[in-house]
Structures are given as C-alpha cells and as structure tokens.
Amino acid sequence: MLRLNYQKGINARTGDFEYHRVFFRLTDEMDINLVGTTSWQLEGGFVEDDVPVMKMFHGKGSDGTFLFSPGSFNTMAFGEFYHHQFVSLYLSHNFHQLLWKGSWLSPDISIHHHMLFGKASRGELHNGFAINDTRKGYFESGINLGNILRLGIGGVGVSAFYRYGPYGRKSVRENLTISFSLSFFND
C-alpha cells in the first residue's frame, strides 16, 4: 500500500512562511506457509531547509511510553532527532503461535529490525533549539512476545529492543528498552 502526502505552506494572514513538504509510506506483507508473516514499511520525506522545527520530520521515537509501538523507534526518545529529509525502514517477521497454542496462553513471537537515515540541513541551533539528525544511521532490533496472556478480545505481552550503531548509548542498560505490548481482536 502506498500513501503519499504533499503539503504547501503559504505566506498569508494565518501563515508565516511558504514551504513544500512531501511524505511517503510504502507497506507490504507476505504470508509464508508454516513460517509466519513478514512485513515491511518504508517511509521517507523531504521539507525545505527554512522551516521551523515543528514542520521538520521527527524520528518517531516511542521510548518512555512503556508500550511496544510498531512503526516507531522503541529505543528513541520523542523529539531526539529531527530531519529535513529522511528515509526509514521497519522490517518484522511474526512467527505467530508456532510454539504453543492454548485458549488463554498463546504467545505470538515476532522479531523486528528498524533503521533510519536522516539529515537536518542546518545542525546548529534552530531558534535556541539544538537539532540532532541521524545521517550516520540509527539502528535498533528487538523481539516481541505478544499475547502471552489472552484476555477476552485482546492480549498482553512484552517486548525488548536494543539500540546500536553510531547513535548507541554508553551502556547496555541505556540501549535496552523493555515494554508491554497490547493487542485487540486476535484470531
């Protein structure tokens, strides 16, 4: 599935600046008999250099929410990175219930790898706000044990993600994020 979004800012009574902003998302998934489902999501965007931080692309960080969030960076803090142009890839494979299938205990095991490359044209202070980008590449990988407990129409699980590469932090503990996962309307 392809999603394309174009925005144009105009310098009018309610707007302060003109800009062009383009965003795309391309997703697909493939069922593999007896192995599970592989899915991927590719995103990218471009916005002109002279826009304020609120119109730039942020790194879609979800660290600190305590909930596993597919399609985001689970080890990245919200607002940690900003970009004028970026491309990100989210890969996952869900093995579904290959290990155990019970009425209330039916874990879905999925593995994930996420990466992001982005550039802020001016990495200096932006109206007193420090801009960090991911031009060297941001990487994280993880595992989600979803639906460890099935409760009516949903399930509860746990996930663990690890951040590594050029933007990895100093210690293992700082790079590791453990979260709950919630799901609804399971098979």
Image (cartoon, grey):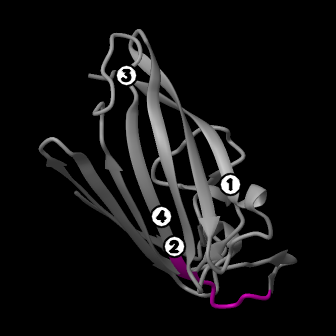
Rate crowding at label 1 as few (under 14), some (14 to 19) or many (20 or more) other CA atoms within 10 Å: many
| Disc with the residue nearer the chain's start (2 vs 1) | 2
Q: Amino acid at mark 3?
A: Ser
**Dot in front, 4 or 1:** 1
Residue 114: give its label: 4
Quick check: marks 3 and 1 in contact, CB under 8 Å? no
User: Can residue 77 be seen by looking at this rendering?
Assistant: no
Residue assigned mark 3: 106
Residue assigned mark 1: 176
Residue 116: give its label: 2
Quick check: marks 2 and 1 in contact, CB under 8 Å? no
- Disc 1 is placed on an element classified as strand
Rate crowding at label 3 as few (under 14), some (14 to 19) or many (20 or more) other CA atoms within 10 Å: many
Quick check: marks 2 and 4 in contact, CB under 8 Å? yes
Side (left or right) of 28 relative to 170: left
Q: Amino acid at mark 2?
A: Leu
Quick check: marks 4 and 1 in contact, CB under 8 Å? no
| Disc with the residue nearer the chain's start (4 vs 1) | 4
Residue range highlighted in magenta: 117-124
User: Can residue 12 be seen by looking at this rendering?
Assistant: yes
Marks 4 and 1, how far apart in space? 14 Å
Relative height, residue 51 to residue 144 (above, below): below
Marks 2 and 4, how far apart in space? 7 Å
Q: Nearer the viewer, residue 4 or 102?
A: 102
